[in-house]
Amino acid sequence: MSIYREIQNYIYIVYCGKYIAYGINTGMESMMSNISEYKINALPSKTWYWLNLNDTKITWDSDVRPCNIETDGYVDAFYDTQSNDYADISASVKTGAGEDADVLFAEDNIKSLVINADKGADNKVIYVNIDDSAAADNMVNQSGKLVVNVEDNVTFTIIETFNGKDGVTGNTAFRTLIDAGKNSHVKLVQVFLQPKGQDVLSDIGSRCADEAGFELVQLFLGEGSLYDGIRTDLKGDKSEFICDIGYFGVDKQNIDINLISNHIGKKTNCEIGVDGALKDAAKKVFRGTIDFKNGSSGSTGAETENVLLLGDDVVNKTIPIILCAEEDVNGSHGATIGELDPETLFYFAARGIDSEAAEDIMTKGRLEVVVRKIEDEKIEKLANEQLGKVLGEEEQND
């Protein structure tokens, strides 16, 4: 193992004054600014500034166009952006990217899609496709917002796909806000397929009432950089947040994730799983915070991450955090970060499979686990096709 790789190892720090548990590494990089600079994905509790992990600085043109949004499936749930629900959710549901990103979602510049999932939407699915049509002139940024109000006792699924054409270099910012009523279950699936040269900022906020559940499945299979903010407020008693994220970082791609699970009600629960691989000088930051607020007694939370490092030129930074202002809670975090071990490579070599093919097999295997959590045949097929593309399977078959 090289010296460079050794500095990627975890350092765990426990600060007992506020029960903060950090997992970090010492890799660092600077973010350059040449247009307008915004701070996003801020940690709720800051760590040392020299680590460059407290937030992320992005350069983004706030002069944006409304993005193109296409829908399919259950479309009877749309309603007016002038409704009281829209105004309340937009104002009160906070997101993972943070308030500094609000300028990118100014109402005059974005395309807003509003959904009211009532009893008629129970067990229905809506497909939302965000493409680069508005940025077809190149170097044009586009923005959009989806606001979802799910009424009590309703189960509803939203599937978002992010697409683009090769050669188009405009960026996309998209915000998804979800208000889950009592005993409702909301599933949000996001599949990122954008080509190289197109960066995406995905900003998610959700609020869960008593016994409500929010399930999030994300797959990062695009070739452009991705900035991902996620915040869930488990306000209601016995509310729950389940999150599964899979990513494959390639070709100097930046993946920056900030996930915050706020436990406010009693007996709330979150389960966060992140699984991915990095190769070809890709960089990834994962900030995962479980925050047990005062009054959240009986709550539980767990987060794990598994990272496969496929080369000495990749950079991984992971910082899982547990904040605790309540005694009667149970929180845990863990991570596995490293290369394929010699025993695994020997196993493949004995069967005529070289190290590069072995890495592809292991990467595909761990991401297919997340693909199956989509539970939609059409989108699973789309994700598997894109996974094969980024793994180079199409070239191998030609």
Image (cartoon, rainbow, N blue to C red):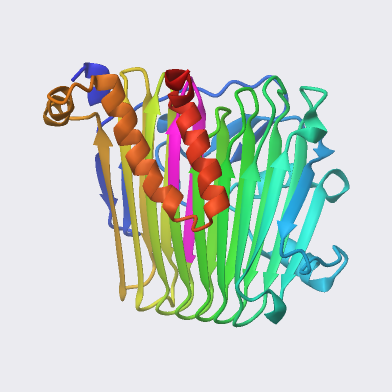
- Identify the residue at horizontal 77%, vertical 47% (top origin): 69
**Residue 337 vertical placement versus 102 (above, below):** above
Q: In the rendered structure, which segment of residues is drawn in magenta?
A: 245-262
**Residue 207 vertical placement versus 197 (above, below):** below
Residue 196: x %, y % from top left: 60, 23
Q: Please give left or right for residue 114 compared with residue 101 in the image.
A: right
Say whether residue 247 is magenta: yes
Residue 193: x %, y % from top left: 59, 36
Towards the viewer: 224 or 8: 224
Towards the viewer: 381 or 200: 381
Towards the viewer: 270 or 17: 270
Say whether residue 58 is magenta: no
Q: Please give left or right for residue 366 compared with residue 343 in the image.
A: right
Q: Please give left or right for residue 128 compared with residue 16 in the image.
A: right
- Identify the residue at horizontal 59%, vertical 32% (top origin): 57
Q: Please give left or right for residue 34 compared with residue 217 in the image.
A: right
**Residue 337 vertical placement versus 35 (above, below):** below
Towards the viewer: 229 or 125: 125
**Residue 73 vertical placement versus 234 (above, below):** above
Q: Quadrant of residue 286?
A: top left
Q: Quadrant of residue 138?
A: top right
